[in-house]
Amino acid sequence: MYKLIAVDMDGTLLKEDKTISDKTKKAILKAQHKGVKVVLASGRPIEGMIRYLEELNLTSEEDYVLSFNGSIIQNAKTKEVIRKNILKGKDLMYLYDIAKQVGVNIHAFSSKGCITPRMSKYSEVEGVINNIPVLEVDYSTVQDEEDIIKIMMIDEPEILEAAISKLPKSLYDEYTIVRSAPYFLEFLNKDSSKGTGMKALADYLGISKEQVICIGDAGNDLDMIEFAGLGVAMGNAFDEVKQAADYITKNNQEDGVAHVIQKFVLAG
């Protein structure tokens, strides 16, 4: 019997208009009534998840949330941090230098919000979807030991693709690097990912991996899908995510999350 379901948001839980369908809401509620924990696992900060947590009634002291691709795990009501692995200002300067060398824009998340040395449409998108400030900041003013939660190289998909091919291979040993969208490449603490986050949360809750379902669509969902007892790729998922999954559901416009819950949780 499955006891924990982790659901990615963009491209998975959310339709293209960033809403949750009534069918999906009802399926999640039925799973909760059956005693199954449902956890949102997103690359977003918690500020960009709150209205969806409230909409799904996932805001009690028994609810948890993975934000920033598993960099932070916290209680949805009390905001108590269960696990936190983040970066520092010195990482930002290091990756900023590399971003300039390979010719892409960059932004990062700090206690101030989203900070960028130069505003771009993709930084503006972060502000809008997550309801957080986006600030132009001279990165030379960032202190080496300042907390930086995650860093992102951002640009047009073809520009970012070319830049990725030029990145030093050593970066993959120093950071967790995930492609969360065609225009986003994310750099996290090496000990952070949705997969390591879900393992930590499952251990904290005393739930075995065999009792976990993880559902996602993009590169940042890959290792949690590999971790889960049942790893599920959306019908609209990246090819490499589909290849790693145990099951491929319908796409995010066709209530793919609801389909999984009905088939593997409610039908039993």
Image: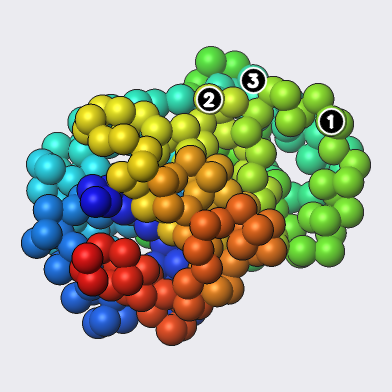
First in sequence, mark 3 or 2: give its number.
Answer: 3
The reply to whether the C-beta atoms of the residues labelled 3 and 1 are less than 8 Å apart is: no
First in sequence, mark 3 or 1: give its number.
Answer: 3
CA gap, disc 3 and disc 2 = 17 Å
Q: Which residue is mark 2?
A: 191
Residue plotted at (31% across, 81% down): 21
CA gap, disc 3 and disc 1 = 19 Å
| 69 left or right, relative to 94 | left
Q: Give the image location of residue 146, x and y in percent.
A: 50, 21
Circle on res. 242: none
Q: Amino acid at mark 3?
A: Lys
Q: Amino acid at mark 2?
A: Asp
Q: Nearer the viewer, residue 227 or 42?
A: 227
Residue plotted at (38% across, 57% down): 7
Q: Quadrant of residue 204?
A: top left
Q: Which residue is mark 1?
A: 169
